[in-house]
């Protein structure tokens, strides 16, 4: 639902949704399940199906977040949401005070009522306080921020000690060199690498994953909660874990010097990174060292000299002895070969800058910096990828590695990624050609990957790179979980799954259980059940990602509040019919410049060429163009930044097919379509 009141209805199994104008919604609200009648099909003149709501079948139980207003004994939740244009009538909640931020669920909206009615499910606190705002984001997305007492009690009853019974049937890696490499601020360590040289000159590399499935039994209280959550959620200032702390930070965290139960993928690898004899099964380990990425990277950058050097104390691992340094250097060489081979096979290489918000102990943002991936990150990434694809291939080929998928392959949970959208790729090709790039073939998957990688390499360090990356990403399909394997296009793997993070992803837990069943010779699992679980896990992943983005946006707006009036250089990161979006340097913080604030000309959206063109001057504002902006305003409530242009670009050649004004009767619907990505209107005070 939009702030303006019109809606889009998504139809199960259909790509095209249905646009419904505000007067035809019959009280339907964001997230509701409805019956919709299509009144106009997509035609040559109508770019989208339109219709009307016949009935509201089920109200969403997802809360709306707003400000509590009380008059006498009656309460209202005043909405500032971009998906909720109506206030909600509610009974005054216990402990609720006027001006507090609350989460409310709509119970109904009968004909004749001026607004929907519902009830408050949580009193979040006073607006602007960090705890209030982070809980508000979680509530808005229907994400829990605490475990019930029953779940906590069930976790507490899981034994802390490891007995001989627990070790039975497990392969013992406690005397094999083993270590973890994680971010400096990591709280849980769910994967470790073991390394030893073999007599034949090859290496044995073990990828050891916390054996969550041993502790969390199907249909237990902890399992049901993890299944519902689907994933851990990472907000700017906190992690909302999928599992209670006793499991995520203690029992299943591979901390150094502690014996842990693990599920492992073990490989024999030649110095040329050829992989042989994969083995999968339950193990127990004792991690020797805990590296952070910085210390591991220091060893890698020192190279052979690292074998002659002593590194100071880093993380929790103290001094690093020569054998461990040697293992890191050898594993890095193997990982780089695996990485090179993957890209040659057609993996897509995107290196979009990843920005991290720095916060103080109160949650206040104090800085923004770019996170860089280096060899230490790639080392871990490549061996996790190796484990994931090897487990998927083992199941899909009935244990015949380097083979083809079997017609009677057993039910499994795959991580799949479809081919890119060819129409969008054609748009990228045309856009890149304006900068003089000769874009190669986009006829098949492997050609597309090589073309995109080549284009990114050619545009590296040039102003248009960001725009090219944005358009390339928009052409990509979304990865998801499925019981039907179509391969993973982006990674160039015919078989792929998620095996390596059962602490934070429920699909990994399902994969561990299925793999155990099949290693023991069990029959194929029920496909219908796992298909539904894949759908649920994919949906929860999307919700978690949206919540994470919202928390980042909130902190970025908060960070920019004291910078109103300041000027920054940036580039155009989006062009729409209502304005341009600009990412400023060096923080990459995005805000919007409405066309109505540009005084030099009246700008019109030229969708085909990803730009806006001035009607009088023919100045062109294109995706990727450098601009200078001034911060005009901030809205924490809407998580929005307003920018204004300080200077325009020189005029550019404009083709004869400049968009013209029109009285097209479809214009209202076209504007509505665009508002799906649009900033909401400010609430009138």
Image (cartoon, grey):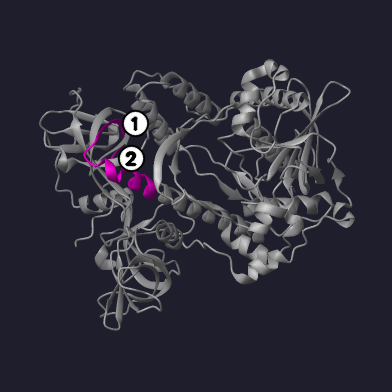
Say which quadrant the C terminus sits in: bottom left
Q: Using a 10 Å C-alpha cutoff, classify the residue at mark 2 as few (fewer than 14 neighbours), some (14 to 19) or many (20 or more).
A: many
Q: Using a 10 Å C-alpha cutoff, classify the residue at mark 1 as few (fewer than 14 neighbours), some (14 to 19) or many (20 or more).
A: few
* Residue 423 seen from this side: no
382 relative to 236 in the view: left or right: right
* Residue 270 seen from this side: yes
* Closest to the observer, 530 or 293: 293
571 relative to 498 in the view: left or right: left
Q: Secondary structure at mark 2?
A: strand
Q: Residue at x 34, y 24 (%)?
A: 463
Where residue 153 sits in the image (x, y, percent)? Answer: 67, 69
625 relative to 425 in the view: left or right: left
Alpha carbons under labels 2 and 1: distance apart: 10 Å
* Closest to the observer, 392 or 68: 68
Label annotation for residue 4: none
Where residue 528 sits in the image (x, y, percent)? Answer: 65, 60
Q: Residue at x 30, y 72 (%)?
A: 98
The region drawn magenta spans: 553-576
Give the labeled residue for mark 2: 590
Magenta region includes residue 267: no
């Amino acid at each position: 639902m939009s702030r303006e009141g019109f809606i889009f209805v998504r139809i199960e199994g259909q790509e095209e949704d249905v646009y419904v104008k505000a007067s035809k919604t019959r009280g339907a609200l964001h997230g509701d399940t409805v019956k919709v009648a299509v009144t106009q099909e997509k035609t040559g003149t109508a770019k989208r199906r339109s219709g009307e709501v016949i009935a509201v079948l089920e109200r969403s139980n997802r809360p709306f977040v707003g400000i509590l207003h009380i008059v006498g004994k009656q309460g209202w939740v005043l909405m500032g949401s971009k998906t909720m244009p109506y206030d909600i009538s509610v009974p005054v909640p216990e402990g609720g005070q006027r001006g507090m931020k609350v989460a409310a669920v709509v119970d109904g909206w009968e004909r004749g009522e001026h607004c929907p009615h519902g009830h408050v499910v949580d009193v979040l606190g006073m607006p602007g306080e960090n705890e209030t705002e982070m809980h508000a984001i979680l509530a808005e997305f229907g994400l829990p921020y605490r475990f019930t007492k029953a779940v906590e009690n069930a976790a507490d009853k899981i034994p802390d000690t490891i007995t001989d019974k627990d070790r039975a049937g497990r392969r013992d890696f406690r005397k094999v060199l083993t270590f973890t490499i994680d971010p400096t601020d990591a709280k849980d360590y769910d994967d470790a690498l073991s390394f030893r040289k073999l007599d034949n000159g090859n290496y044995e590399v073990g990828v050891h994953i916390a054996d969550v499935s041993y502790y969390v039994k199907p249909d237990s209280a902890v399992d049901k909660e993890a299944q519902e959550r689907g994933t851990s959620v990472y907000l700017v200032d906190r992690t909302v874990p999928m599992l209670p702390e006793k499991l995520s930070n203690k029992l299943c965290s591979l901390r150094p010097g502690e014996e842990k139960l693990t599920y492992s993928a073990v490989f024999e690898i030649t110095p040329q990174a050829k992989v042989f004899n994969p083995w999968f099964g339950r193990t127990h380990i004792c991690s020797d060292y805990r590296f952070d990425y910085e210390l591991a990277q220091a060893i890698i950058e020192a190279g052979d000299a690292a074998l002659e050097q002593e590194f100071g104390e880093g993380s929790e691992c103290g001094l690093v002895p020569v054998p461990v340094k040697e293992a890191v250097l050898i594993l890095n060489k193997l990982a780089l070969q695996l990485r090179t081979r993957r890209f040659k096979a057609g993996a897509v290489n995107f290196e979009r800058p990843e920005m991290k918000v720095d916060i103080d102990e109160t949650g206040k943002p104090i800085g923004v910096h770019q996170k860089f991936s280096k060899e230490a990150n790639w080392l871990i990434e490549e061996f996790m990828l190796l484990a994931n694809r090897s487990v998927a291939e083992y199941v899909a080929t009935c244990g015949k590695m380097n083979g083809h998928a079997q017609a009677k392959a057993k039910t499994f949970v795959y991580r799949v990624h479809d081919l890119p959208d060819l129409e969008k790729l054609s748009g990228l090709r045309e856009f890149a050609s304006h900068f003089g790039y000769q874009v190669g073939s986009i006829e098949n998957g492997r050609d597309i990957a090589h073309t995109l990688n080549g284009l990114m390499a050619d545009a590296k360090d040039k102003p248009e790179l960001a725009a090219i990356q944005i358009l390339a990403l928009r052409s990509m399909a979304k990865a998801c979980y499925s019981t039907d394997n179509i391969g993973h296009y982006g990674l160039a793997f015919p078989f792929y799954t998620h095996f390596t993070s059962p602490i934070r992803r429920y699909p990994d837990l399902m994969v561990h259980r299925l793999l155990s069943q099949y290693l023991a010779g069990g029959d194929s699992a029920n496909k219908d059940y796992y298909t539904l679980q894949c759908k649920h896990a994919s949906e929860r992943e999307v919700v978690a990602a949206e919540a994470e983005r919202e928390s980042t946006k909130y902190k970025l707006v908060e960070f920019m509040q004291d910078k109103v009036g300041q000027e920054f250089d940036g580039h155009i990161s989006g062009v729409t019919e209502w304005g341009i979006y600009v990412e400023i340097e060096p923080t990459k913080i995005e805000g919007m410049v409405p066309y109505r604030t540009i005084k030099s000309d009246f700008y019109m959206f030229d969708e085909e060429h990803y730009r806006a063109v001035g009607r009088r001057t023919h100045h062109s504002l294109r995706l990727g163009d450098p601009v200078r902006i001034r911060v005009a305003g901030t809205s924490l409530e809407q998580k929005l930044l307003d920018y204004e242009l300080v200077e325009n670009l020189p005029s550019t050649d404009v083709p004869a097919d400049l968009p013209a004004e029109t009285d097209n009767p479809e214009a209202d619907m076209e504007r509505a379509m665009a508002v799906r990505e649009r900033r909401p209107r400010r609430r009138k005070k």
